[in-house]
């Protein structure tokens, strides 16, 4: 299933599909950490979250008096041990973030509202290899990053050199970062993957087609794909030649249903009077080995209406003809 040969124009799409098809057997898993600190009059000073694949492990927002509570799936002896490490690490990180936004704003001589963001990420490949990455942005622009292989900070803009030097001068801080991005992050990821198995159960998408006529000249057919997990899904509207349609197709975004599953809508607009040409909505998802395909064709109600109509008239005429013929014979 990993080999897909398509026309040139569809190479990108093809690569994506190949990736999904391959990943259904063995997926790349990731741990993302996002931390945001603001300074100035902003109501929120800190936001932090930690996610394993698309499951939130930890979510903190300043202003709430309580610390985040452990998710139910981590509420057991080993899970709580990990939770303690995660909580301590992220709590410490809030001070790092507050310092970063304060120092950078001072450096730029900024006094009004500014934001500092950090994004840490590590991923585990099916073959056991891994990689990790960390970068910071100031007011939404890349500022510094951490080169895990070289064990050093990189200033993305000249104004960030001061921050790189400051972080590197703290040897203990440097060792802490190296340890986290060389092995700590992946160890967390492996444990979190193990503990979250029950929440990460794959769920098969349900596919429904809904048609409506928003204007006289066209029919809108919505392919509603819902209730699936994981989030990655590939939905195509196929034409008569079984090739994906690009024109007249509007794709929505993958949205959470709120129960751990996702949904996606893809709308096809069919001009009226295209005859009986049929279309199909094809869904590729890791929970099913084969694609799910649901077909749609314009209703032929009027066509069915016309043919019996003609038959009816023909029958009446025939009966009439026989009647008239017999009457004439009787008279004659
Ligand atoms: C964790 O489990 C204990 C019982 O084992 C329960 O009392 C507690 O409320 C649970 N905490 C959360 C946050 O679910
Ligand atoms: C910083 O801002 C203040 C007030 O706007 C200004 O007086 C001062 O010259 C600025 N300093 C630098 C280094 O830009
Ligand atoms: C499933 O759908 C993908 C994407 O449209 C396609 O490339 C693949 O050939 C399909 N597989 C089967 C078995 O039809």
Image (cartoon, grey):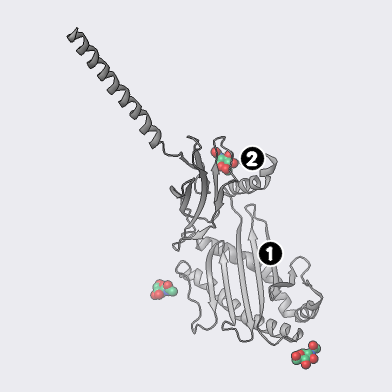
Front residue of 301 and 144 = 301
Q: In this view, does 325 lie above or below 284?
A: above
Q: Is residue 168 above or below residue 332?
A: below
What's the mark number on residue 4? 2
Q: Circle 1 — which element?
A: strand
The percent coordinates of residue 330 (x first, y second) are 17, 9
Q: Quadrant of the C terminus?
A: top left
The residue depicted at 57 percent of the width and 82 percent of the height is 44
Give the mark nearest the N terminus, 2 or 1: 2
Residue that sits furthest to the right in the current view: 158
Ligand 3 within 8 Å, label 2 CB: yes
Q: In this view, does 157 lie to the left or right of 75?
A: right
Mark 2 to mark 1 CA distance (whole Å) = 30 Å
What's the mark number on residue 132? 1
Dividing the picture into quadrants, the one containing residue 6 is: top right
Q: In this view, does 180 lie to the left or right of 218?
A: right
């Amino acid at each position: 299933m990993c080999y897909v040969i398509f026309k040139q124009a569809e190479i990108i799409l093809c690569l994506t599909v190949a990736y999904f098809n391959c990943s259904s057997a063995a997926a790349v898993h990731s741990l993302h950490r996002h931390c945001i600190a603001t300074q100035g009059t902003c109501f929120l000073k800190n936001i932090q979250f930690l996610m394993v694949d698309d499951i939130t492990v930890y979510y903190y927002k300043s202003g709430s008096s309580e610390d985040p509570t452990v998710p139910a799936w981590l509420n057991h002896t080993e899970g709580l041990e990990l939770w303690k490490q995660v909580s301590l690490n992220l709590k410490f990180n809030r001070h790092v973030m507050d310092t970063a936004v304060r120092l950078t704003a001072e450096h730029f001589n900024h006094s009004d509202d500014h934001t500092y963001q950090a994004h840490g990420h590590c991923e585990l490949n099916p073959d056991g290899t891994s990689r990790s990455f960390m970068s910071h942005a100031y007011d939404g622009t890349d500022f510094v990053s951490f080169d895990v292989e070289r064990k050093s900070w990189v200033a993305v803009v000249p104004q960030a050199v001061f921050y790189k030097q400051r972080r590197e001068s703290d040897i203990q801080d440097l060792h802490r970062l190296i340890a986290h991005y060389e092995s700590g992050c992946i160890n967390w990821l492996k444990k979190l993957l193990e503990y979250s198995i029950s929440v990460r159960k794959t769920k098969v998408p349900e596919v429904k087609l809904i048609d409506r006529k928003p204007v006289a000249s066209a029919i809108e057919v919505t392919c509603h794909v819902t209730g699936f997990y994981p989030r990655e899904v590939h939905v195509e509207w196929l034409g008569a030649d079984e090739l994906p349609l690009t024109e007249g197709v509007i794709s929505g975004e993958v949205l959470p249903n709120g129960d751990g599953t996702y949904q996606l809508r893809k709308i096809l607009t069919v001009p009226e009077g295209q005859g009986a040409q049929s279309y199909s909505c094809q869904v590729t998802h890791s929970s099913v080995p084969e694609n799910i395909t649901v077909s749609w064709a314009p209703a032929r109600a009027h066509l069915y209406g016309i043919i019996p109509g003609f038959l009816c008239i023909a029958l009446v005429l025939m009966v009439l003809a026989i009647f008239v013929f017999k009457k004439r014979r009787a008279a004659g």
